[in-house]
Image (cartoon, rainbow, N blue to C red):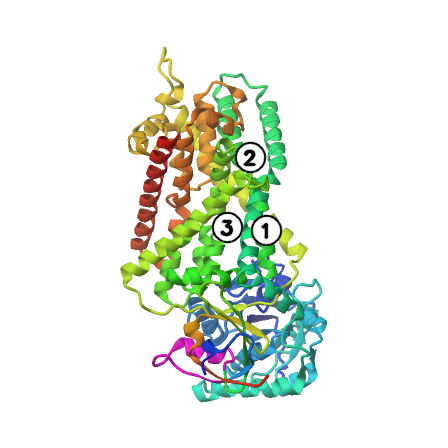
Amino acid sequence: MRLSNLPKGAPAVVDRVDDAHPSDPIAQRLRDLGFVDGEPVRVMAIGPMGGDPLLIQIGSTRFALRRSEAARVAVRPEAA
Amino acid sequence: MNASTLPLSSLRIALVGNPNCGKTALFNLLTGGRQKVANYAGVTVERKEGRFTAPSGRVLHVLDLPGTYSFDANSPDEQITHDVCRGTHPGEPAPDLIVCVADATNLRLHLRFVLEVKRLGRPVLLALNMMDTARRRGIAIDVAELQRRLGVPVVETVAVKRSGAQALIARVDGEVPMAAPLQPDDAASRADLHAQVRELLTASVRMPRATALLDDAIDRWALHPVFGLAILAVLMFLIFQAVFSWAAPLMDGIQAGMTAFGGWLTQALPAGSALHSLLNDGIFAGLGAVLVFLPQILILFLFILILEESGYLPRAAFLLDRMMFKAGLTGRAFIPLLSSFACAVPGIMAARSITDPRDRLTTILVAPLMTCSARLPVYTLLIAAFIPRRHVIFGLFNLQGIVLFTLYLLGIVSALVVASVIKRLRRDKSEHALLMELPAYRMPQLRDVALGLWQRTVIFLRRVGGIILSLTVLLWFLSSFPGAPAGATEPAIDFSLAGRLGHAMHYLFAPIGFNWQICIALVPGLAAREVAVSALGTVYAMSGSDSALVSQLGTVIAQQWSLATALSLLAWYVFAPQCMSTLAVIRRETNSWRYVAISAGYMFALAYAASLLTYQIARLLT
């Protein structure tokens, strides 16, 4: 499942970040920001216009990601 | 831990760390500097240098560097940090000691970069900043254990407290820690850093909760799809209402003071003399006309500073991102565009935090469309003179505030339109990243807000005393000489150089409703936009015989201009062909005259078109 499809508030953990194209700087930045295997992640809020961007909480940090960025992150939903 | 025993008389230290961890606040605290700080990522885009003397007499040269999440730099500001730390920055030896600053409330993110810095093989020290907030939130950090496992000295700091850097000063005044061994930087070992961070956290940090309870509660409302937008709109509206409602008594006070002072100063001089005219018509009419706008500028900045400090601004960016995305702007453009409300010069420089060179260029080109504070005097002069002070919508809103709000909105909308035209022209299909961190909320510090307001006052007064004063005096000369021939019935200014120039320009500007006095004011207005107001003050003082005119510019133009002319001038200044300092900074940041020409050209064209439309439509309706 992709982070961009995760329902708001549903607990999940990161599986991996996929490159959208070879040597994708956005994917690399996401990994540097802590989107790595096993890290708990959650969608905290959804943008008011067209459901974009998403507010993602990972660790103690909240990031605003556009859907195309969040789509690079594969997640495993967890039972609450 | 081993340390070099060599005593050093001076030491070069560099402050590095993730964005918004308080490096600049710490830098200011150490060096007594007054660099700008705010609660969002990417405020610092340049390397800044300062120095202080430690108790032992050792002189410390402190470098403040732009924040970065990793050494895998992808924007110009991050590149500086990367180069300085590696010692490859031109003309800059590698620092003797790297001070990693980390937000103690967010170590999961910040420690990874600390580990990355440690691998450079240079002496490193970790400053755990915001320790006060961490304690308040019940975050327990075993500093001794963290120091042991990390293998670098760790000190606690509170950059917003006066005594908050004592532990850091004591440590950098002592022996320089040994460098960790240099380690290769490859993808596999980088992935490993996260695992190391997890181990460190498990061993030394206990957090009752990942985020502050209050932050989550505020965000539920502030980022709510409906309430969030409503809160943002109400907030913006209140600001513009306040700019008009609160400033009025202060402005009246300044005006009365200026008139009294001008009268007292010039009473001894013979009324017809050149000196009397220079002081009365030139300096007091000109400078006084600009000076009265100080309260409005300060009220606007009071709100901007509070919003900056609180951490709300990135939330506003979150709510409005969809619009920026549609226009082809990267989310990162929000901060540069926001800075442009103060002045386009720092705004354009802040565009350095934008990764993609084309995105950066688009941002630079549209940044001057944001209403800078130099336009505020022009707007408020015209609004106060022509828009009735009436309360509308159930008496809740002041009509003048609404018009001001609309003008600001117009600037924003045109920036979005221009950006999407640029995107269209380039056939840009590339992706525009957002990837923006939302900081924890913070109570604005009274001291920071007061300091920020004081700095704005100094900047404004320096402009008034510098460029505005010199241009005003110059304009007075140009409008006084050559004098009128004997027996002439028109005012003397008609025969002067400035008068002739104004009449010549009038042919070009008559279709948009500008009279020749406005035409004269437009020219010095290119140097600094407020000068347009002081120039109008001088020109009208020179062409009228009434010496009671001083700082009564609003009343004069209300009598002499049509509403259509006033609206047309307002429309002109929404786009206002840029001031010289903006063009100079565009040249410096893009390294190209072409973009200077494009930017000046398109704004002139837009200004003329907007004024033409406004004037012709307003004339039909009134």
Q: Are marks 1 and 2 on the same chain?
A: yes
Q: Chain of mark 3?
A: B
Q: Quadrant of residue B8?
A: bottom right
**Which numbered disc, 2 or 3, marks the residue that appears first in the sequence?**
3
Judge the density around disc 2: few (<14), some (14-19), many (≥20) Cα neighbours within 10 Å: few
Magenta segment range? A15-35
Position above or below: B234 against A35: above
**Position of A11 compared to B615: left or right?**
right
What is the quadrant of the C terminus of chain B in the image?
top left
| Outermost residue, top side | B487
Mark 2 residue element: loop
Q: Which residue is mark 1?
A: B303
Q: Which residue is mark 2?
A: B390
Q: Amino acid at mark 3?
A: Ala
Quote the CA–CA distance across marks 1 and 2: 24 Å
Q: Which residue is mark 3?
A: B342
Going 58% across and 71% down the picture, which residue do you hit? B11
**Position of B409 compared to B103: left or right?**
left
**Disc 2 or disc 3, which is closer to the eye?**
2
Is residue A16 rendered magenta in the image? yes
Is residue B454 visible in the rendered image? The answer is: yes
Q: Position of residue B318 (x, y in %)?
A: 50, 64
Q: Are marks 1 and 3 on the same chain?
A: yes
Judge the density around disc 1: few (<14), some (14-19), many (≥20) Cα neighbours within 10 Å: some
Mark 1 residue element: helix
Q: Chain of mark 2?
A: B
Judge the density around disc 3: few (<14), some (14-19), many (≥20) Cα neighbours within 10 Å: many
Q: Amino acid at mark 1?
A: Phe
